[in-house]
Image: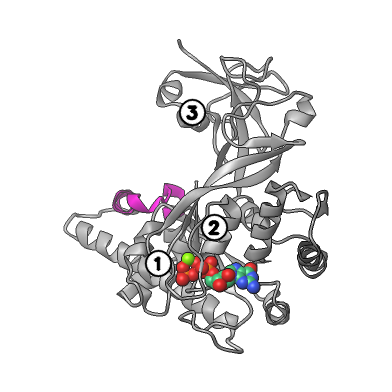
């Protein structure tokens, strides 16, 4: 599962990346600061089932704090996009290809309108323009990839729709697109209009969530009021505030669970207190949180509609074979079947699959049984 951060130069992609991963990447007000992509691990946070089962879990990856489980997701922060990027403008289109593996995109928007389409300082820039051109750039890049793929198979005879799906799946394998996404796109749009087909397929396979960033600025708050009803998935964010809170949390100055409010628990200077009070009053008080955590969670669970499941080796102990309780959480697409989960754990377990066992009911689950969010499952297989 990879989440891609996209946006125009100076919108705050690297700041959002740093806020989510705490990796100290280069951040400046100078456009095209990022050239080589940054890759790191962020977390989606879910209510862990350990509370319900009254056990203490031992996560192999991520952590569990007070029943909140931090499940790792890979984040990629790429260079800034400007109008014409797909044709090689700005720093070119190579880095667009860095997004091939992303399952969902978060567009950071400079909601303050204090930078233009190329990230240069200005006043009163309309963030709608940025949202629109960015989507167009991504769609045109997608269309380019699809066109190249189509050229390759034009020489082959495509007799039926099933053939077309097969060929598209094969040719677009580098784009992390599932068969069901291709089938759905073909139902909605004809392949003969490649640009329109690309738009439809991109929307289904790599949906975009908008992070209305720099919400700590007055201009951004004003613009956000005009934007919020217009887009289905839009979250106000302040990457800068999130970095400040995470840092203060690390130093023990505050008690902070990302995505929530915080409490001052340490010795803070007058300056620090003022900055923290500003974040509390102007951001958390108005929007509920700094928004960065919310973006990741919404991208994975609302846009992609993924679910979290817990594979275990023993439903009675809820553990793996070494006795670690609830060691893993897998993020999988909705409708994932028990057999598909088995294959995700290990190809061999998929091949030798007998049945699944539900930890709550201890009932057997068939290969085709569809998993639900929060399921804890053992896979029985031929040894
Ligand atoms: N006020 C405010 N400024 C921010 C916020 N996030 C980022 N910035 C500032 O915006 C500028 C650009 O931030 P970056 O994170 O480097 O932007 P980027 O999108 O990665 O830029 P490129 O790599 O050049 O494409 C820096 O001066 C940041 O300090 C925020 O939430 N609030
Ligand atoms: Mg950057």
Q: Which residues are magenta?
A: 162-182
Ligand 1: image quarter: bottom right
Residue 21 position (above or below residue 95): above
Q: Residue 118: in sight, yes or no?
A: yes
**Disc on the earlier residue, 3 or 2:** 2
Residue 383 position (above or below residue 248): above
Callout 3 secondary element: helix
Q: Is mark 2 within 8 Å of ligand 1?
A: yes
Which mark, residue 197? 1
Report whether 132 appears left or right of 90: right
Spot occupied by residue 98 in the image (x, y as percentages of width and height): 37, 57
Which residue is tagged 2? 17
- Is 265 within the magenta? no
Taking the view exactly as shown, the residue that stands out farthest to the bottom is 123
Q: Residue 193: in sight, yes or no?
A: no
Taking the view exactly as shown, the residue that stands out farthest to the left is 155
Which residue is tagged 3? 345
* Label 3, label 2: how far apart the Cα atoms are: 28 Å
Residue 258 position (above or below residue 290): above
Report whether 247 appears left or right of 189: right
Q: Residues within 10 Å of mark 2 (few under 14, many from 20)?
A: many
């Amino acid at each position: 599962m990879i989440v891609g951060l996209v946006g125009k130069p100076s919108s705050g992609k690297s700041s959002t990346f740093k806020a989510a991963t705490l990796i100290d990447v280069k951040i400046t007000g100078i456009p095209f600061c990022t050239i080589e992509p940054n890759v790191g691990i962020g977390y989606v946070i879910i209510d862990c089932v350990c509370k319900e089962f009254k056990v203490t879990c031992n996560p192999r990856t991520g952590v569990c704090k007070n029943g909140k489980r931090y499940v790792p997701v890979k984040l990629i922060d790429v260079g800034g996009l400007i109008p014409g990027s797909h044709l090689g403008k700005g720093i070119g289109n190579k880095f667009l290809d860095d997004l091939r593996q992303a399952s969902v995109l978060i567009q950071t928007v400079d909601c303050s309108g204090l930078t233009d389409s190329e990230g240069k300082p200005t006043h009163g820039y309309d963030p709608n323009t940025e949202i629109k051109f960015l989507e167009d750039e991504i769609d045109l890049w997608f269309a380019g990839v699809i066109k190249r793929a189509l050229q390759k198979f034009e020489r082959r005879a495509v007799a039926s729709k099933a053939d077309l799906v097969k060929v598209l799946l094969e040719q677009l394998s580098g784009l992390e697109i599932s068969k069901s996404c291709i089938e759905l796109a073909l139902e909605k749009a004809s392949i003969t209009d490649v640009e329109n087909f690309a738009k439809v397929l991109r929307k289904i396979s790599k949906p975009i969530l908008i992070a209305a960033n720099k919400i700590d600025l007055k201009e951004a708050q004003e613009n956000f009021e005009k934007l919020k009803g217009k887009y289905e998935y839009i979250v106000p964010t302040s990457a800068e505030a999130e970095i400040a809170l995470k840092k203060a949390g690390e130093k023990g100055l505050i008690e902070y669970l990302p995505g929530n409010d915080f409490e001052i628990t340490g010795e803070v200077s007058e300056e620090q207190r003022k900055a923290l009070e500003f974040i509390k009053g102007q951001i958390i008080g108005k929007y509920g949180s700094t928004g960065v955590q919310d973006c990741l969670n919404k991208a994975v669970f609302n846009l992609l509609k993924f679910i979290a499941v817990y594979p275990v080796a023993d439903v009675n102990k809820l553990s793996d074979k070494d006795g670690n309780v609830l060691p893993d959480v897998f993020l999988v697409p909705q409708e994932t079947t028990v057999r598909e989960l088995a294959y995700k754990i290990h190809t061999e377990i998929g091949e030798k699959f007998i049945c699944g066992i539900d930890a709550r009911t201890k009932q057997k689950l068939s290969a085709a049984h569809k998993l639900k969010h929060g399921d804890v499952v053992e896979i029985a297989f031929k040894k």
